Image (cartoon, rainbow, N blue to C red):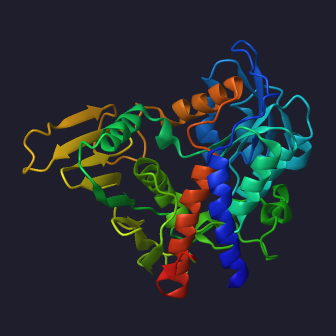
Amino acid sequence: MASKSLSRRKFLATVAATSAMTLPASAQPIGANERINIGLIGTGGRCRHLMPALAKVPNTRMMALCDVYEPNLELAQKLAEPKAYTTRDYHALLARKDVHAVLIASPDHWHTPMTIDAMAAGKDVYVEKPLTHKMREGAEITAALAKHRKIVQIGTQQRSMPHIVRARELIQAGRIGTVHKVRMTWNRNSDRVRRGPQNVDIKRLDWKRFLGNAPAQDFDDYKFRNWRWFWDFGNGILTDLMVHWLDVAHWVCNVDHPDKAVTLGQFNTARDVWQTPDTIQTLLHYGTNLQMHFEGTFCNARGGAFIEFMGTEGSVYIDRGRFELIPEPRFPKNKPEEQILGQGPRGRDFYTTPDGELVHLQNWIDAIRNQRQPSAPISAGVSAAAAAHLGNEAYRQNRVAVWPK
């Protein structure tokens, strides 16, 4: 326990240092007309969801692909350069001098090692959330950033969505008074919980490379397709979904870690299938005046995905398509305000407008060109993931998890 506590204290110092970090004076901006060659590592479903958006970013080229499963490479080739380089070994992709930046959409347990290796190879990085799979990785990746000084964007795209930027401005301007409670919800109803044939051709998969630093184990086609719900590869709902809203909450409220966490989890439809619970609630406590509550399930989609900031003079509801400022009746001079960009029901996972992936990828490329911090830097990714890890610690140890002093 002592070494784990030490790594967390080190995390606090490194996050503070990274947040204030400036890029070296020797770094040269890249002209708007210069093409940025991008390599993609982990070309599964999430990567292929991002590729059409990346194709819309001017003067970028998806010219190198890496995945341990050949069918994933073949599907990604249809979305990339016709003659894109392909490999199973991400080190071979990073060794290419013609690759300027990489997008990492591998399983979670690979995010930190691959990002560190990419920075060491001189590449700027877009890496999917969560940034870390284990608490100790926060200190490791911030130390690597301090050493290599590369542009790293975490895939928490809410920070680049214009309506969320506006909502943050209103909250920080005091429009809803003092925020004392944050409610976060992400509910789905999914058939992923069912075991059955996963249509994986083991002859075309490098299972050992997939495992990486995870414990050695026999091939399991369900784990390969559904790795998020197994502790060796992912950390369940909290790091898959809660981190999105938690990152927004940290950003809006100017906090970086909770003091303590309590989590209740249960299995409704995924018992004996997943290791991580399919239904979960987490309460996070920040200082003396702020609580954050998350609820998520894969067994009922009511409410969808949203975050709500509750202040002494009003509340702000945010989903990926809108925000609504609702004053408390006691404060009639505080006028309602809203911005609706996404069409359709409240709480959707995705809206056509705003295209969160596109604006976030554009922000990353702009940061590379101008050598400035992106909207979701490493410090933010470390903080959001660490809070989720504390929540999972509370669940797995069945106790109140306390952040070491």
The location of residue 387, given as percent across then percent down, is 53, 65
Residue 132, image x and y in percent? 66, 60
Q: Nearer the viewer, residue 220 or 300?
A: 300
* Vertical side of 311 occupied by 172: above or below: above
Q: Which residue sits furthest bottom?
A: 398
- Check the image and report above or below for 96 versus 395: above
Which of 198/384 is in front?
384
The quadrant of the rendering that contains the N terminus is bottom right
Count of residue discs: 0
- At x 41%, y 72%, the residue is 279
Q: Residue at x 33, y 31 (%)?
A: 341
Quarter that holds the C terminus: bottom right
Q: Is residue 214 above or below residue 50?
A: below
Residue 290 at x, y = what percent? 35, 64
Q: Is residue 325 left or right of residue 207?
A: left
The vertical placement of 391 against 185, above or below, is below
Q: Is residue 147 visible?
A: yes
